[in-house]
C-alpha cells in the first residue's frame, strides 16, 4: 500500500501488541526506545499514532509537534503522563488499557500482604547474611483475620476473592459501590471509614488518586488503626501520607507496611520508607504492579488493537477522551452538556449526604432541544445523560472519567441508567435527574435561561434558584429566624465571603434549603461549626470549578 499509517513505539511493550501492527498491511511500524523529549518532538510530525508506557510524557509540546497525530496509545492504565486537554483540543484520541493488568496488580497485592505479615524479605536477607534467626521472624497468619479493602473496584473485588480463600473475614469501604455488588462478592460494606479501619487487622487500598483520596491515610487516620495492624498500598502514590506511615511503623502503631507506589518516583535517598530503623517491618517494591509477562502482553494487545481500529475509522473502545462528541453539538447543546455534568456533581454530593451510593440514575429531558437527535442509534444514551454520569462519577473517581467510559463505569458499579424525554413545562428546556440510593433518592431540576445563564431551580422538594458556578455551600436548615445571620457570622469569622445566596422553603415542613456561592475554602471543622451554630440538618460544599 502506498499510504500507510505510521506508528511510533517509544518504550518496551508486549510483543502481542507489536505483532498487531507488524501484521497490518496498512501500518508502518517504528520502534525507537530511549529517545529524549527533544528527539521525540523532532520526529513526531511524521507519525499518525504513538504508543507509550509511563516513561514517555506526552505533554502539550509533544502533542503540538505531532501535526499528523490521530491516536495516542498507553499500554497501561494511568494516563497521568498524557495531557488529555491538549489532546482533546487537537481532536487526538487517547486510548489506554484499563483492565489488562488487573490480575497482576491483584497478585502483587497478595504477595506484598503475605510478605509483610510473614516478614519474608527480611528473613531472606538474614539468611543470605549467614544467620539462622527462626525466632526473630514470627509472623501473623491471615486465616481468621479481618481484611478491610478500601475501594471495591476491579482489583479490590479480585482481592476479596483471594482473601476469602485464605480464610479471612472481608469487609470493604467504598461509598460509590452499591450494596448489591458487595453482596454478590459476599463482602460486608461499611459506611464509615474510621469504624471500618478500627476493626481491621489488615487494610489494603485500591482507590484512584483523587482530590478526595489524597493523603486519605494521614496522621489522624493512622491513630484509628487497631494497634498492630498492617497496611498495604499497591494503588497510587499520594493516597498515604508517607512520613506519617513511617512514623506509625516506628512507633509500633502499625506492625508493618507494604507498598508498590510512591508520591514521587524513583525514591530519593532520604525517603521515609528507606529508614534503617523500620527496614525489618516495611516491604517496598519499585512500582511493579503491572510487570508480569501476561499483563504486559494484554495491555499491549488492548492498546494496539484499539489504536488500529481508530486509525481505520472502525469501531473501537477504551478511549479516555472523546472530543468529537462535543464538536458535533451546537453552542446551546454544549451549554446543556456542561450543565448536565454539573448536575451529576451536585447529585453525587447530595447522595454523600445521605451516606449511600447511587444505584439508579434517571434522566428526564424536556423541551424541543432534545428532540433533534434522529441520528441517534437505538438504545444509545444521549450526550446529556452521559454528562450526568460523568459528573456523578468524577466526584469519587476523578478526572479520568470520560464521556466514553462513564456508562461503562456506571455499569461496573451496578448503577442502572435510564432516560426519557417529554414536553416542556414551566421552562423551555429542562434536565431533571433523580438519583436513587439505598437510603432514599435525590432529585435536581435545572435549566438555562434565555440570557444563557445556568440555573438549578429545584433540589428535592425545594424550589430554589442558584447558579452552579464556583464553590457552592448547600445546606438544609430549620426554618426559623436568625439562622441565616448565624451562618454569615460563622463564615465571616473564617474569612469566607458570600457571593450569592438562594433559599427554598417547603410549606408546612419547618425546614428550608439554602445555597450560598462562596469565595474561600471550607473544611470539615467549619462545616461542623455551621451545623452547630446555624441550626443546620446537613451541609455540603460543591466545587463546580472543575466541571466547566
Image (spheres, rainbow, N blue to C red):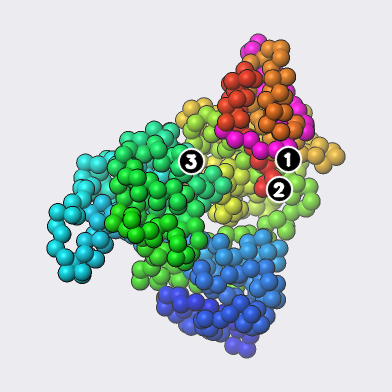
Q: Quadrant of residue 134?
A: bottom left
Q: Can residue 255 be seen in this view?
A: yes
Q: Which of 490 and 236 is in front in this view?
A: 490
Q: Which of 210 and 495 is in front in this view?
A: 495
472 in the magenta segment? no
Question: Dot 2 lies on which element?
Answer: loop
- Residue range of the region highlighted in magenta in the rendering: 499-524
The quadrant of the picture occupied by the N terminus is bottom right
Image location (x, y in percent) of residue 349: 58, 36
- Which residue, given by chain and number where applicable, does mark 3 sit on? 176
Q: How many labels does the image show?
A: 3
Asked whether disc 1 touches disc 2, contact meaning CB atoms under 8 Å apart, the reply is yes
The label nearer to you, 3 versus 1, is 1
Question: Dot 3 lies on which element?
Answer: loop
- Which residue, given by chain and number where applicable, does mark 2 sit on? 548
Residue count near mark 2 (Cα–Cα under 10 Å), binned few <14, some 14–19, many ≥20: few
Amino acid at each position: 500500500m502506498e499510504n500507510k499509517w505510521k506508528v511510533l513505539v517509544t518504550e518496551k511493550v508486549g510483543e502481542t501488541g507489536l505483532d498487531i501492527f507488524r501484521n497490518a498491511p496498512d501500518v508502518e511500524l517504528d520502534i525507537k526506545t530511549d529517545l529524549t523529549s527533544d528527539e521525540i518532538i523532532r520526529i513526531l510530525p511524521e507519525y499518525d499514532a504513538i504508543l507509550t508506557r509511563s516513561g514517555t510524557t506526552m505533554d502539550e509540546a509533544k502533542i503540538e509537534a505531532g501535526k499528523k497525530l490521530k491516536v495516542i496509545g498507553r499500554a497501561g492504565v494511568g494516563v497521568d503522563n498524557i495531557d488529555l486537554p491538549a489532546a482533546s483540543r487537537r481532536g487526538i484520541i487517547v486510548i489506554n488499557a484499563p483492565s489488562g493488568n488487573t490480575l497482576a496488580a491483584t497478585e502483587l497485592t497478595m504477595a506484598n500482604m503475605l510478605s509483610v505479615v510473614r516478614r519474608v524479605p527480611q528473613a531472606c536477607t538474614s539468611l543470605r547474611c549467614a544467620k539462622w534467626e527462626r525466632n526473630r521472624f514470627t509472623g501473623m497468619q491471615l486465616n481468621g483475620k479481618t481484611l478491610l479493602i478500601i475501594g471495591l473496584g476491579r482489583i479490590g473485588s479480585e482481592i476479596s476473592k483471594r482473601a476469602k480463600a485464605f480464610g479471612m473475614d472481608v469487609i470493604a469501604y467504598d461509598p460509590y459501590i452499591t450494596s448489591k455488588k458487595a453482596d454478590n462478592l459476599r463482602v460486608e460494606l461499611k459506611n464509615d471509614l474510621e469504624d471500618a479501619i478500627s476493626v481491621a487487622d489488615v487494610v489494603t487500598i485500591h482507590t484512584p488518586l483523587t482530590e478526595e483520596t489524597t493523603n486519605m491515610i494521614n496522621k489522624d487516620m493512622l491513630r484509628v488503626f487497631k494497634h498492630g495492624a498492617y497496611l498495604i498500598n499497591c494503588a497510587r502514590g499520594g493516597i498515604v501520607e508517607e512520613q506519617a506511615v513511617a512514623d506509625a511503623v516506628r512507633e509500633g502503631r502499625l506492625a508493618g507496611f507494604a507498598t508498590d507506589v510512591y508520591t514521587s518516583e524513583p525514591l530519593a535517598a532520604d525517603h521515609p520508607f528507606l529508614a534503617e530503623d523500620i527496614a525489618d517491618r516495611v516491604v517496598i517494591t519499585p512500582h511493579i504492579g503491572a510487570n508480569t509477562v501476561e499483563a504486559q502482553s494484554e495491555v499491549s494487545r488492548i492498546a494496539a488493537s484499539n489504536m488500529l481500529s481508530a486509525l481505520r475509522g472502525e469501531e473501537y473502545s477504551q478511549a479516555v477522551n472523546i472530543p468529537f462528541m462535543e464538536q458535533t453539538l451546537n453552542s446551546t447543546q454544549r451549554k446543556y452538556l456542561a450543565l448536565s455534568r454539573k448536575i451529576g456533581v451536585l447529585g453525587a454530593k447530595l447522595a454523600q449526604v445521605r451516606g449511600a451510593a447511587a444505584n439508579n440514575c434517571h434522566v428526564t429531558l424536556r423541551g424541543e432541544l432534545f428532540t433533534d437527535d434522529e441520528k441517534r442509534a437505538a438504545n444509545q444514551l444521549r450526550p446529556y445523560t452521559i454528562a450526568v454520569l460523568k459528573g456523578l462519577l468524577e466526584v469519587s473517581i476523578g478526572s479520568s472519567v470520560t464521556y466514553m467510559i462513564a456508562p461503562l463505569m456506571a455499569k461496573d458499579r451496578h448503577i442502572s441508567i435510564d432516560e426519557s424525554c417529554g414536553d416542556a413545562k414551566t421552562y423551555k428546556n429542562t434536565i431533571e435527574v433523580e438519583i436513587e440510593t439505598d437510603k432514599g433518592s435525590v432529585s435536581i431540576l435545572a435549566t438555562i435561561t434565555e440570557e444563557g445563564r445556568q440555573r438549578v431551580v429545584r433540589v428535592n422538594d425545594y424550589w430554589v434558584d442558584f447558579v452552579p458556578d464556583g464553590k457552592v455551600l448547600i445546606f438544609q436548615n430549620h426554618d426559623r429566624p436568625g439562622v441565616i445571620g448565624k451562618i454569615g457570622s460563622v463564615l465571616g469569622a473564617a474569612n469566607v465571603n458570600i457571593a450569592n445566596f438562594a433559599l427554598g422553603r417547603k410549606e408546612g415542613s419547618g425546614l428550608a434549603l439554602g445555597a450560598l456561592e462562596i469565595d474561600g475554602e471550607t473544611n470539615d471543622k467549619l462545616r461542623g461549626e455551621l451545623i452547630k451554630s446555624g441550626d443546620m440538618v446537613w451541609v455540603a460544599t460543591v466545587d463546580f470549578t472543575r466541571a466547566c
